[in-house]
Image: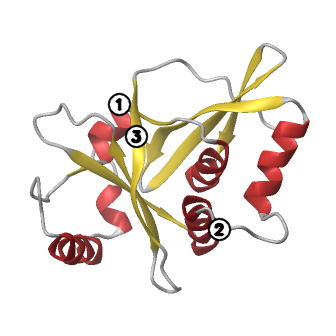
């Protein structure tokens, strides 16, 4: 098992703005948005994820009960049974179009930080009600302007967002040096 003790850096609290569950070969994407949009230009951070993880996040967001625990439910149950808790999830790095995350656990007064995929981390955060953050540098280099009007029509907003998603590709997220 690999433990990752990362440096403390500036992080921005975010929420899940939307989740698009694609049926392969269409991609799935989770879109994160800073909680406080005190910026001159509001922005969103889309992250491409697998369809299984997207479905898992969607089930947790909807609060849909399952007769048996799904993988992320099982993981949350293990953490709880070990008397630990998820204290936060941070999307802390991006390399090309690949995002990286850390999950921080509190156990017996000790903080343990683990390397994880963003999709698994978000699925776990939704189930455990842990706060979700994005490293400020990641947000600055990989986010897009939030292009909707302040009080848009719901249907027009969804159409515009679908057009936005159809127009972007994973290659758009490569960090330019």
Crowd class of label 2 (few under 14; some 14 to 19; many from 20; radius 10 Å): few
The mark closer to the camera, 1 or 3, is: 3
Label 3, on which residue? 14
Q: Are marks 2 and 3 in contact (CB under 8 Å)?
A: no
Report crowding for label 1: few under 14, some 14 to 19, many 20 or more residues within 10 A (C-alpha): some
Horizontal and vertical percent for residue 98? 49, 54
For the residues labelled 1 and 3, the Cα–Cα distance comes to 11 Å
Q: Residue furthest top?
A: 109
Q: Name the foreground residue: 160 vs 27.
A: 160
Q: Position of residue 80 (x, y in %)?
A: 83, 38
Q: Nearer the viewer, residue 144 or 156?
A: 156
- Left or right? Give the position of 31 relative to 63: left
Residue 78 against residue 137 in the figure, above or below = below
Which is more toward the observer, 54 or 83?
Answer: 83
How many other residues sit within 10 Å of disc 3, few (<14), some (14-19) or many (≥20)? many
> Residue 133: image x %, image y %?
46, 35
Q: Secondary structure at mark 3?
A: strand
In the image, 32: left or right of 172?
A: right
Q: Return the residue at label 1.
A: 136
State which quarter of the image contains the N terminus: top right
Q: Is residue 116 above or below residue 92?
A: below
Residue that label 2 marks: 64
Q: Secondary structure at mark 2?
A: loop
Of pointers 2 and 1, the one earlier in the residue sequence = 2
Q: Residue at x 12, y 41 (%)?
A: 41
Q: CA distance from mark 2 to mark 1?
A: 33 Å
Q: Position of residue 109 (x, y in %)?
A: 79, 13
Q: Dividing the image into 4 quarters, which one contains the C terminus?
A: top left
Q: Which residue occupies 78% across, 15% down?
A: 110
């Amino acid at each position: 098992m690999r433990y990752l003790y990362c440096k403390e850096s500036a992080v921005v609290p975010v929420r899940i703005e939307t989740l698009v569950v694609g049926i392969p070969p269409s991609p799935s994407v989770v879109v994160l948005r800073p909680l406080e949009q005190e910026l001159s230009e509001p922005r969103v951070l889309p992250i491409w994820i697998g369809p299984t993880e997207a479905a898992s996040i969607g089930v947790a967001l909807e609060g849909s009960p399952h007769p048996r625990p799904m993988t992320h439910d099982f993981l949350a149950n293990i953490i709880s049974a070990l008397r630990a808790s998820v204290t936060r999830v941070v999307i802390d790095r991006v390399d090309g179009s690949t995002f990286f995350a850390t999950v921080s656990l509190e156990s017996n007064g000790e903080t343990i930080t683990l390397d994880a995929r963003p999709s698994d981390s978000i699925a776990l955060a939704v189930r455990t009600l842990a706060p979700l953050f994005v490293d400020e540098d990641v947000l600055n280099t990989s986010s897009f302007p939030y292009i909707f009007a302040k009080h848009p029509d719901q249907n027009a907003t969804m159409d515009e967002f679908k057009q936005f998603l159809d127009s972007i590709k994973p290659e758009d997220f490569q960090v330019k040096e």
